Image: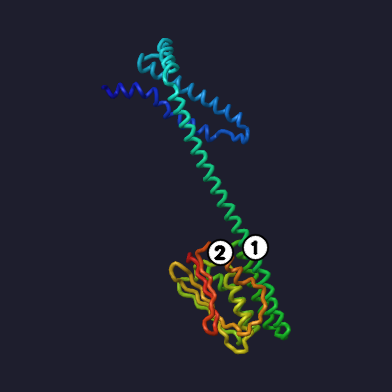
Amino acid sequence: MNYWDTWLSYIPWWGHWIWLAPLLIARIHNLPYLGSKRLEMLWQHIVMCVVTLGTYWIMTVVTISLIEANNVNFGTLVYVAEFIVGGPFHFDAMIYVCIVCLGFVGLFDKYVMSEQARNKALSNQLVQTQLEALRAQLNPHFLFNTLNSICSLIRQHDEQSSLKALSELSMMLRKVLENRSKHLVTVEQELAFTHSYLNIQKMRFGDKLDEKITVSEGCHDMEIPFMLLQPLLENAVQHSSQLSTYNNPIHVTIKFEEPFLVITLVNRPANDNNHQGFGIGIDNCRQRLKRIYGNDFVLSLEHQGDVFITIIKVPAGD
């Protein structure tokens, strides 16, 4: 057997699909979507089938004529055309159907990927909207309580402290505006915001509060949700301020324990705690952490002796 002659004799019958298949698949991907107009879609495919197979057979006739007779003449064309019509031309139709199916598989895969990207974008948009709603819930809440603290200073006729508290509040509102489009800020930025809040509370409650914030080296540039600490500190201040003793601890520790950034808040609540808040702080924090980190976070609350410990663990990132 002469392999060259064998391949040369078969290539005209099958080789032209090398050129036609990509064109056919590209045409399928670019067909206009007609929705429920199935009859028009059917006619599209019938015309495409006739054109494709007709082109394929013409190319086959010409190629075989050139190979076998070294020229294209009417007799050779008639012979090859009769062979195609009288032979197993259904194989060509089967190949055409297979290529069309592959084209639709690729089109469906493209559609699925597009829908996945669209669903992901919508999901992200939903999360962003939910986070914005939670942030919007926090803003008037902290503003209401902070203004209450300033009103207490005004009632005490402490003008200097009142002016300083208003200055701290303006700094807090400025940071809220600066970070209105951000859900994550660095630990350093978050602490700058909470320091302003604690300064106002320190003016109001004086030595009743013993606030202390400790940050481990390398944690200042890690990111956490904006206004995560403030509602937790607000709860701690409100509960600890009811105690009759002085120097009640409100201690915050921030450290890195791979792979988490760990925030620990320790405060001493009153045994007969009758502070009636709005119940926004902890629940809001939990929902925001859920939206941002999914299930990859920890928010635990526990009593240990006479202190209350709040622990937050979030994935550490720069």
SS label for mark 1: helix
Residue in the foreground of this view, choosing between 183 and 306: 306
Name the N-terminal-most of marks 1 and 2. Answer: 1
Which residue is depicted at the point 57% across and 87% down? Answer: 247
Count residues near mark 1 (Cα–Cα under 10 Å), then give few for <14, some for 14-19, many for 20+. few
Q: Residue furthest left?
A: 1
Q: Secondary structure at mark 2?
A: helix
Residue ranking furthest to the top: 75
Q: CA distance from mark 1 to mark 2?
A: 14 Å
Query: In this figure, which colouring scheme has been used for the structure?
Result: rainbow
Q: Which residue is mark 2?
A: 290
Q: Residue at x 54, y 42 (%)?
A: 111
Residue displayed at 45% across by 27% down? 94
Image quadrant assignment for residue 137: bottom right
Q: Is 294 rendered above or below residue 60?
A: below
Q: Name the kind of residue labelled 1 in the image.
A: Ala
Residue 86 appears left or right of 28: left
Quarter of the image where one finds residue 91 = top left
Q: Is residue 137 above or below residue 87?
A: below
In the image, 291 versus 219, the foreground residue is 291
Image position, residue 299 (x, y; %): 53, 70
Which quadrant would the N terminus be assigned to in this image?
top left
Question: In the visual, does 170 lie left or right of 185?
Answer: right
State which mark lies toward you, 1 or 2.
2
Q: What numbered label is drawn on residue 133?
A: 1
| Residues at discs 1 and 2 in contact (Cβ within 8 Å) | no
Residue 182 position, x and y percent, is: 58, 62
Q: Amino acid at mark 2?
A: Lys
